Image (cartoon, helix red, strand yellow):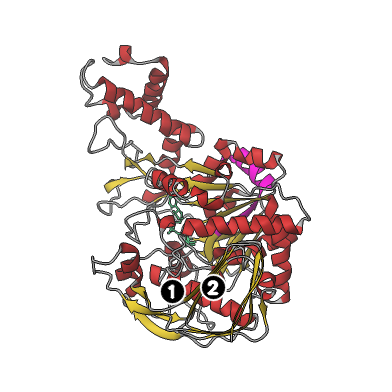
Amino acid sequence: QKNLHLLSPEEIELAKMLLDLAQGHLFENWAEPGVDDDQKKGFFEQVARLHSSYPNGLASYVKNARVLLADSKAGKNPYDGFTPSVPSGETLTFGDDNFIKFEEAGVKEARRAAFVLVAGGLGERLGYNGIKVALPAETTTGTCFLKLYIESILALQQASCESSQGDCETEIPFVIMTSDDTHSLTSELLESNSYFGMQPSQVILLKQEKVACLDDNDARLAVDPQNKYRIQTKPHGHGDVHSLLYSSGLLHVWRDSGLKWVLFFQDTNGLLFKAIPAALGVSATKEYHVNSLAVPRKAKEAIGGITRLTHSDGRTMVINVEYNQLDPLLRATGHPDGDANCETGYSPFPGNINQLILELGPYIEQLTETGSAIKEFVNPKYKDASKTSFKSSTRLECMMQDYPKTLPPSARVGFTVMDGWLAYAPVKNNPEDAAKVPKGNPYHSATSGEMAIYRANSLILKKVGVQVPEPVLQVFNGQEVEVWPRITWKPKWGLTYSRIKSKVRGNSSISQSSTLAINGQRIILEDLSLDGTLIIHAIDNAEVKVGGSVQNKGWTLENVDCKDNSEPEVLRLRGFKFNKIEQLEEKYSEPGNFSLKKP
Ligand code: UGB
């Protein structure tokens, strides 16, 4: 009351709203008028931000929180009444006719797509001292995730233009959702690298806001312990991406410019773009409103399970059940072993890799209907069994893959299962935690993420006829991994199976200890026998035939101790580095046809 005369009409409205929501405690310890006035202004700025960034405003947040907190206190399970079963979806095998057909359909569609990367997470589990998209996906070339993603989108853009006979004006929009934790580092990474070749206008950063923390079951907003003029906030989760896209107006702009698809993906999956063309082809061919990408999942793996849920009232949906909820749900519905592998050695539920393809028109309609709100959840840590107080403040959270939960039964919701080796190798776990992963389950570490890229590239070359030997097993940072030849290529070289096949001719072989980096679009491998390290750079209009016998001492792998602070953090995280003893490195910077043929 005493401060009222200092407030603007907007601030008075916000104060009234808070009082109506029974949040008067937020003002309890405020100083006399004339003291801390700037901080009081700052408080209202924060409240205005919390109000405008939440679908339907702060009142809605508090209301939703009260309902969810009451449900949680009553022990209500969001899956009550639902029976899980294994859904059926499209299963693709890399390189077979079906896969190739979908890939070509997907490449055509790509010029009507927009890509959205959710990169607001700090990656606490990885413990990396920077943003995850700046980490090298692999250390042969040192290409970071963001560069890999941008080059992949540009390669798709070019291929899609070519397949449409010349509509080469297309610029595929690329949105990155950041947060206060990642925003400035992401924009610096882009700016200091000339947007990795993308037009700066093509890249749009949308920053997600945190949400207010809650102190008790009545959803009293928590005062920041460090500052009595601030409400304590925490991240709301990757589900924010939907309301951000909607409120930014981008979805309508995209629809008006003829786009049809929005593809969502995460910050550290170095394999993802090998699966995207085919998955987009599935969406287009099957006319899916929602298509989730999945891979075979090991029981207890920290990825959600795609599940068909059938309610006792007849409702049914195909949806991700998050990894921490799948086991209790199965146990509660007559599966005493819970989240367990079946005879295939995998969980019967396909693993959600959180790559979603949404059809833009139905997506806009749905967000308009829901005000862009996504189903939320709350996870309070109670002090005791009475569930009346929390150990620390909590907040509502939401996940982007929960978008289909509010869809009508008429929506076409599908999923596409890809080979795990082709589509999914995230970098999420620090070395200590990765080493504790049960044997046979994926480590999800920087070590496994990099080795998975070499494995996938080796398997793909094998599939198109190159002789590649079996891998050797090696232990880095306490994790036993398959070590294949270290083969890398630019996305524009190897975007799809057919494009790769067209660039591999004759009889080629690559030994297990070899390293091959293909840094150019029109590099043809023809009767190449590689035993050592070969690095080729070529500009787009230089065609280079690479063949003959290339032999040198190459690059060897050396162990790096994750605790050895004399090594850079990116090497400690993966537990190995290259000893670059000898290599053949060739650069072609003039247009024309060339041949690198060693006798
Ligand atoms: N992220 C944000 O952008 N903002 C946030 O507030 C939080 C995260 P995690 P998670 O496929 O690998 C998901 O933490 O949430 C970004 C699925 O829920 O890496 O444990 C963040 O930057 C799960 O079903 O993953 O698990 C990152 O890019 C499974 O599919 C992304 O969101 C699993 O991912 C994911 O955040 C997976």
Picture quarter with ligand 1: bottom left
**How far across and how far down the image is residue 13, in percent?**
42, 20
**How far across and how far down the image is residue 352, in percent?**
53, 64
Residue picked out by circle 1: 442
Residue type, mark 1 in image: Pro
Looking at the picture, tell me which residue is in the foreground, 240 or 387: 240
Looking at the picture, tell me which residue is in the foreground, 98 or 575: 575
Identified at 44% across, 45% down, the residue is 187
Q: CA distance from mark 1 to mark 2?
A: 10 Å
Tell me if label 1 and label 2 are in contact, CB under 8 Å.
Answer: yes
Answer with mark 1 or mark 2, whichever residue precedes in sequence: 2
Q: Is residue 506 above or below residue 244?
A: below
Residue 307 visible: no
Residue type, mark 2 in image: Gly
Residue 350: name its quadrant: bottom right
Looking at the picture, tell me which residue is in the foreground, 374 or 64: 374
Identified at 30% across, 64% down, the residue is 568
Q: Residues within 10 Å of mark 1 (few under 14, many from 20)?
A: some
Q: Which quadrant is home to the N terminus?
A: top left
Residue picked out by circle 2: 420
Q: Which quadrant is home to the C terminus?
A: bottom right
Residue 300: name its quadrant: bottom left
Describe residue 466's horizontal placement relative to residue 384 as left or right: right
**How far across and how far down the image is residue 448, in percent?**
42, 72
Q: Secondary structure at mark 1?
A: loop
Identified at 33% across, 74% down, the residue is 435
**Residue reaching furthest right?**
165
Number of numbered discs on residues: 2
Residue 107 visible: yes
- Residue 356 in magenta stretch: yes
Which region is colored magenta? 355-373
